[in-house]
């Protein structure tokens, strides 16, 4: 479990990935990734936890922009 948490955290930081992207890459559910990053990681590696929180906060801030772009691509076809 500890290795999965660290591997997922490194993936998120390296790729600036969303929770969905990380879940797909690691083969686990979104809720597993979410609980690993928010509950378990801070006790395993606090500096990596801070980096992950920054990436996830950024993804939360731009979520509405990604949704708009997806809608634009959908209707452009």
Image: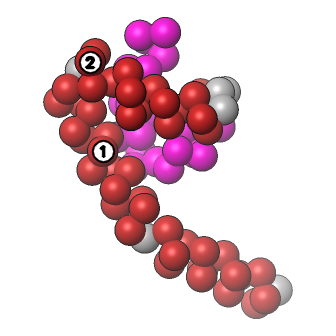
For label 1, the SS is helix
Q: Which residue is most to the right?
A: 77
x then y, percent, for residue 62: 43, 70
- Residue closest to the eye, 46 or 69: 46
Q: Residue at x 48, y 30 (%)?
A: 35
Give the CA separation, mark 1 to mark 2: 14 Å
Of callouts 1 and 2, which one flags the residue occurring earlier in the amino acid sequence? 2
Colour setup of the view: secondary structure
Quick check: 15 left or right of 67? Answer: left
Stretch in magenta: 1-24
The mark found on residue 43 in the picture is 2
Q: Are marks 1 and 2 in contact (CB under 8 Å)?
A: no
Callout 2: SS: helix
Q: Residue furthest front?
A: 39
Q: Which residue is mark 1?
A: 53
Q: Residues within 10 Å of mark 1 (few under 14, many from 20)?
A: some
Residue 45 sits in which quadrant?
top left
Quadrant position of the C terminus in the picture: bottom right
Residue 15 in magenta stretch: yes
């Amino acid at each position: 479990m500890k290795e999965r948490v660290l591997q997922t955290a490194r993936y998120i930081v390296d790729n600036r990935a969303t929770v969905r992207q990380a879940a797909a890459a690691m083969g686990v559910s979104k809720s597993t990734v979410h609980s690993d990053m928010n509950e378990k990681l801070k006790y395993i590696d606090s500096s990596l936890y801070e980096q992950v929180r920054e990436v996830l906060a950024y993804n939360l801030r731009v979520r509405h922009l990604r949704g708009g772009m997806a809608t634009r691509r959908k209707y452009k076809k």
